[in-house]
Amino acid sequence: NAGVMQNPRHLVRRRGQEARLRCSPMKGHSHVYWYRQLPEEGLKFMVYLQKENIIDESGMPKERFSAEFPKEGPSILRIQQVVRGDSAAYFCASSPGRQGGYTFGSGTRLTVV
Amino acid sequence: AQKVTQAQTEISVVEKEDVTLDCVYETRDTTYYLFWYKQPPSGELVFLIRRNSFDEQNEISGRYSWNFQKSTSSFNFTITASQVVDSAVYFCALSDNSNYQLIWGAGTKLIIKP
């Protein structure tokens, strides 16, 4: 198992476009977490999902951002109508259970031009 | 409210020196977890350690050691005989009783000069 896989590693979008970030958790992990890292800052929690369910989205901006973790396939973080302030590194992590330790992916670096 | 403070924004030392990275946390929970992660220039996050609030024993792993003191709410990280490859940003993080949401410090950039 290659670990938590995120793609793409780098994504460039023009203002107003949509960004779709993908995260495939480790085999056997059914819990997925998304974090955002703004330049020169620590990570900020965005959302916690289990298969087909959003458990906690308290860190998600109210507009333009959404996340899903379907029964089949990767978890998707979707940002509509991107703005320059969305430029950041987005990290996904997975765990086998709610109490389990995290494993992080390598992140997707979104640049909005 | 929970908070993690890494007061040292950047530290620069010469190779082979020992260096300590400070981490101070705030929480009202009696059960919590503390973490250290390394973020090298390549950008990925490398897990270093997870410590629960009931285990105050210091831990040593090779050149790395951690000093957990509940009395001062600190979880400091020391690298002994630093090497250039240790150059990275180091993050301290805290999770609450729910144990899934991590609260992160702002990070300390460590520069090891040859």
Image (spheres, rainbow, N blue to C red):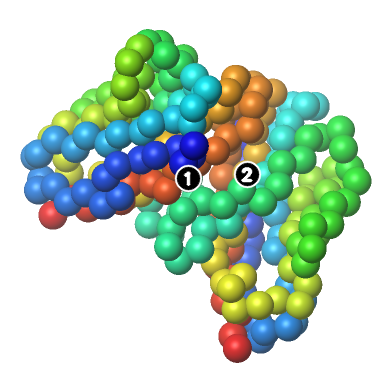
Q: Which residue is labeled 2 in the image? A: B93
Element carrying mark 2? strand
Rounded to the nearest angstrom, the CA distance separating label 1 from label 2 is 9 Å
Q: Would you call the spot at circle 1 few (<14 residues within 10 Å), some (14-19), or many (20 or more)?
A: many
| Residue with the mark numbered 1 | A43
Q: In screen coordinates, is A95 left or right of B65?
A: left
> Would you say residue A99 is visible in this rendering?
yes
In the displayed structure, A8 sits above or below B15; it is above
Residue B62 falls in image quadrant: bottom right
Give the percent coordinates (x, y) of residue A1. 49, 37
Q: Which chain carries label 1?
A: A
Q: In which quarter of the image is the C terminus of chain A?
A: bottom left
For image coordinates 58% across by 63% down, the residue present is B108
- State the image coordinates of residue A32 (x, y, percent, origin top left): 46, 26
Residue A64 at what x, y percent from top left?
21, 28
Q: At 85% across and 52% down in the image, what residue appears?
A: B59
Q: Which residue is drawn at 38% across and 57% down?
A: A39
